[in-house]
Image (cartoon, grey):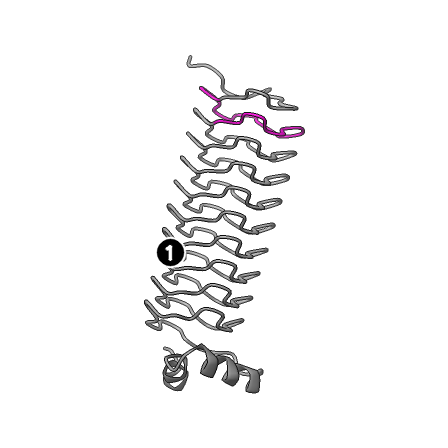
Amino acid sequence: MADERQMKLIRKGVAAWNKWRQANRTIRPDLTGANLTGLNLAGIRLNKAKLTGADLSRSHLANALFEGADLRKARLTQCNLSAANLNKANLKSAHLDHAHVTSASLGGADLSRSSLRGATLVKAHLSGADLSACDLAGADLSDADLSGANLSRASLRGAELTRAMLSDANLAGADLADANLVRANLGHATLAGAILQNADLGRCYLTGAVFAGADIRGIRLEGARGADLRGAIKHDY
């Protein structure tokens, strides 16, 4: 359960909360299961906070500091996390459907089994993040940095990945059907067993990418460089 005194403090506003954090650096905030929906918390300092199961839906969290925070199963649907710092945060099984995460930092964050359907992650930094079994269907990841990220078994059906950096990413078993990957960098990425039906990989960098067992029926590769499609499923049998 959330600490009642901390709940009262955070509802006083960001200035009061951040002043308290500055004066009490050794205290780890406990807002477990807190209802913080629809609040303006832009720039708030919630690094290393306990926010498991908290509801922050529709809240304004731009430039907020969540580094190392525990956000497992938290609800962040339709919230604004633009330019927020979520490096190494635990967002396992969190709900971020239709959230705005533009230019946010999520390096090394755990987003496994989370839901980001229709979320906007343009220019987000997700290098080394765990997005395994994550639902990113219809999400916009244009210009996002996903280098070295774990996207195994993730759903990226219909996602926008134009110019995304996916070098060394693990996309084994991922669903990328109908995704737009034009000009993406997939150098040395693993796409074994992935579904790429009708995906657009035009002008992609594909040197060293592994497509063994991937379903590439209907794939578009106009202008792609370095494609080695050995072992991929190319035709109906």
Rendered location of residue 217, percent (x, y): 45, 20
65 relative to 55 in the view: left or right: right
Count the numbered circles shown: 1
* Secondary element at tag 1: loop
Q: Give the camera-side residue of 125 and 148.
A: 125
Is residue 192 inside the magenta stretch?
no
Helix, strand or loop for the magenta stretch, by majority: loop
Identify the residue at image location x=45%, y=68%. Answer: 42
Identify the residue at image location x=34%, y=62%. Answer: 58
Rendered location of residue 64, percent (x, y): 50, 67
| Callout 1 amino acid | His
Rendered location of residue 13, percent (x, y): 41, 79
Place residue 12 in its image quadrant.
bottom left
Q: Give the camera-side residue of 221 and 4.
A: 221
Question: In this picture, which residue range is highlighted in magenta?
Answer: 200-219
Rendered location of residue 223, percent (x, y): 59, 21
Mark 1 Cα shell of 10 Å, populated few (<14), some (14-19), many (≥20): many
What residue is disc 1 on? 95
Place residue 79 in its image quadrant.
bottom left
Identify the residue at image location x=42%, y=54%. Answer: 100
